[in-house]
Amino acid sequence: MANGTIAVPPQTAEIDFYNVRGRHKGILSWLLTIDHKRIGILYLGSVVFFFLVAMTIGVFMRLEMLSPGETFMKPQTYNSLFTLHGVIMIFLFIIPAVPAVFGNFFLPIQLGAQDVQFPKLNLLSWYLYIIGGALAIISLFSGGGIMDTGWTFYVPYSIRTTTNVSLSVFAAFVLGFATILTGLNFITTIHRLRCPGMTWFRMPLFAWALYATSWIQVLATPVIGITLVLIILERAFGIGVFDPTIGGDPLLYQHMFWIYSHPAVYIMILPAMGVVSEIIPTFSKKAIFGYVPIAISSLGIALVGYLVWGHHMFSSGISDTSRVIFSLLTFFVALPSGIKVFNWVATLYKGSIDVTAPMLYVLLFIFIFSIGGLTGLALGALNTDLHLTDTYFVVGHFHYVMFGGMGIIFFASLHYWFPKMFGKMYNEKVAKVAAIWIGIGFNTLYFPMFIMGYLGMPRRYYDYLPEFQTYHIIATVGSWILVSGILVMFFNLLQGLRKGRKAPDNPWGGTTLEWTVSSPPPMENFKIIPEVTTGPYDHTHIHGQEDNK
Amino acid sequence: MRPSIVNQVDETFWLIMGISIILLLIITAAMIYFVYKYNKKRHPVPENIEGNTTLEIVWTVIPVILVLIMFFVSWSGFRNMRDVPKDAMIVSVTGQMWKWTFEYDNKKKSDTLFLPVNKDIKFEIRSVDVNHSFYLPAFRTKEDAIPGRVNHYWIRTTDIGNYYAACAEYCGLNHSYMYAPVVIVPEEKFLVWKNYFPPDTAKTTPSAVKTDSLKTDTLKTAPVKTDTLKSNAVKKDSAGK
C-alpha cells in the first residue's frame, strides 16, 4: 500500500535496528543501548513480565473468593495478595505500559526525530524502573513479610503494620523517578525535535496525549515521592506528620496521596486515549473527527484532573463544602472523556472500516470504557458515593476504566504496532478470536462487581456473607475466561514473532510517520529528516491512488 | 416530614443509571451500526469528514446539562444526609481492630447496635487505632472512623428488623470480620434494653440508671434477656427496603 502524502524518500533498504552493529555486542547491546526503540523493547519485556505476575495474583484472589470463609488461603495471605496485585499493576504495569513502551518506541518516529531529546536519561529511566521492580521483589522476601496495606498505603495502618512497608514504599519512590524522567524527556522531545512542517496541530494525537501525560508525570509524581518518604520517616522515627497519636493527621496523608494518585489515573488513561485516536482513523481510512477538540481535551483532562482528588475522600470526614466543590469538579472532568468517545464514534461515520484485530480491541475499549466512565458518575455524585464507596462497585468501576481502558488498549497497541516493532505479522484470525474471548471474560468477571457493590459488599474482604456468593462465583468463572483469552493472545503474538510472515512497511495503510520507515525501523529512524505538509490523518491522497487501481 | 435518605440515594442512583444506560445504548448502537454500514466491503470509498462544530457543541452542551442535573439531585440528597435533625438520639460508635463498640447517652455500652424504630439517630464515629468505616448498607451510607477525629452521620430507623454494620475501610487482618449486628426494635423494648445493666457492669458504672432523659414509667430495672428482643425482629434483606 502507498504511503501518505508525506514527502519521504523510500528507506526500505536499510539495516533494521536489531541488526545494526553498534559499540556493544550481545546482551550489552541491549543493556547499554541508548536507542529509544531498544529501550522501548526492554520496557515491553519488563512490563509484560510484571503484568503476568500481577495477573496470576489476581487469579489466586478470585479463586479464594469462590466460597465464603477459607477456600485455600489465610486472611493474611489474601491481604498481601491484593496489595501486591494493586502495587504491581499500578506502579509497574499501568503507569509505564503505554508511555514507556509505545511512547518510547513511536513518539520520536511520529515526530520525525531520530531519538528522544535525552537518550542516556532514557536508559537511566529504565534502570530506575528495574531497580524499583527489584526492590519490590526483594521486599517480598525480607523484613516483616509481604506488605498488607493495600496499594493506597493508608496511615495509620501502614505505620502500625509489622510487614515490610518501608522497602516496598521505597520501591514505589524509585519508580516515581523513572516516571518523572520519562515525562521530562517526552516534553523536551515534543518541544524541540519535531521535524520541519510538524506544527503543534499536525502532531499525531498519540503525541498530544503523551504531552499531556508527561506534564502530569513531571508535576504530580514528586508529591507521591515526598508522601512515601514521610511514611518511611514516620515508621522509622515517629516524626508525627501522619500519626495521630503524636500529633499527626491521617487525613493529611489521604490528601497528599490523592493529589498525586488522582492525576495518576490520567497518566494511566490519556496515553491509551491517544492510541485509540491513532487506530480509529487508520482503520476507518479517514481523518479523525474533531482533531482539535480531541487534542485540547487531553490537556483539559490533565488540568482539571488535578482538582478532583477529594472525590476519593467523600466518606473520610472532609468538610461538606469541599465535598460539594469536589463533586461538581468531578462531574466536569467527566465531560472531556465523554467528548472523546463521541468523536471516536463519529470518526467511524462514512468511513471505510476494516475490523482488524487492533480495531476490534478498540471497539471493545469504547464499549467497556463507556461503562467504566458512566459508572463513575454514580461515584462522583455525593449521596450515592457514600453508599457505594469502598464497595465492589468501586472495584468494578476502576477495573472497567483501568484494565478496560489502559489494559485493553495495551493489547490493541501490541497488535497495531507489532508489525512495525518486530517486522513480522501474527495470525489475524486467532488474534480476533482472542479479542472477543477477552471481551466476554472481562465483562463476566467485572460486571457482577457493580451488583455486589450496590448490594453492600465491601472491598478488600477476605470473607463475605453467603448472599454474595452467586456473584463471586460468576466473577471467578469470568477470571478464568479472561485469563485464558489473554494467554491465547500472548501465545499468538509469540507465534507471530517466531514464524510469522514478514510484515510490509505499512500493513494497515497508516498515515503517520512511523509507517513511512521500514519494518522494523532502521537505526536513527530516518536517513533524511522528513518534512510534513499535511495533518496526521490525511487519507485523501491514498484513496485518490486506490481509485485509480 | 423529611424525605428518606435511603429513597433519595436509590432514586439518585437509578436516575444516573437510567441516563447512563441510555447513553451507553446510543454509543454502542451507533458504533455497531457504523461498523456494519460503513464496512470496507459495503463502503469502499471513505468520505473525508474532519469535524463538525455544531455537533461538537451539541454533544458538549447536552452532557453539561445532564451532569448538572445529576449534580443537583445528588447534592440535595447530600444536604439532607448532612443536616442532622436537632432531636436526634446520639450514639457513639467506636471502631477498633476488629470490632465496633456502641455507647448510648446513659453510658450503656454494647457490641450490638440496638436502635428504637421511627427515630432519628446520629452516630458520632471515632477510632482508637487505625482507619475504619462505619457502613450501614441497608441505610445506604457510611463515614470513616479516623483516629483523632469525630465524624458523624444520621439515619432514620423505619422498619423493625435485623441489619448489620460492616467495616468498609481496610483495617488489617480481620477487616472482613468486623461486622456488628444492628437490631431495630420498638421504642419501649429499646428503653428496657438500654436501661438494663448487668450486675457486674452496674458496679463499674455508677450512673447505671440515668433519669434525666427518660420517662419514669420506662425505668425498669428487671432483667430482660436480649434474645427475646430478637425474636420480634423481622428478618430483612441486607439491601432491601
Image (cartoon, coloured by chain):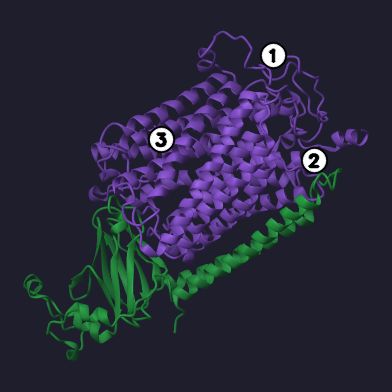
Chain colours: A purple, B green
Question: Do residues under tags 3 and 1 come within 8 Å of each other at their CB atoms?
Answer: no
Mark 1 and mark 2: span between their CA atoms? Answer: 30 Å
Badge 3 or badge 1: first in the primary sequence: 1
Chain holding disc 2: A
Residue linked to disc 3: A172
Q: Nearer the viewer, mark 3 or mark 1?
A: 1
Of the pair A133 and A185, the residue shown nearer to us: A133
Return the mark for residue A15: 1
Q: Secondary structure at mark 3?
A: helix
- The residue drawn where x is 24% and y is 86% is B188
Chain holding disc 1: A
- The residue drawn where x is 58% and y is 21% is A38
x and y percent of residue A538 in the render? 81, 37
- The residue drawn where x is 61% and y is 36% is A210
Question: Do residues under tags 3 and 2 come within 8 Å of each other at their CB atoms?
Answer: no
Q: Is residue B221 visible?
A: yes
Q: Secondary structure at mark 1?
A: loop
x and y percent of residue A141 in the render? 30, 32
**B84 versus A367 height, above or below:** below
Of the pair A172 and B213, the residue shown nearer to us: A172
Q: Is residue A76 left or right of residue B74?
A: left
Q: Amino acid at mark 2?
A: Lys
> How many C-alpha atoms fall within 10 Å of the one at disc 1: few (<14), some, or many (≥20)?
some
x and y percent of residue A214 in the render? 57, 35
Badge 1 or badge 2: first in the primary sequence: 1
Q: Amino acid at mark 3?
A: Ala
Residue that sits furthest to the bottom in the current view: B217
**A447 versus A121 height, above or below:** below
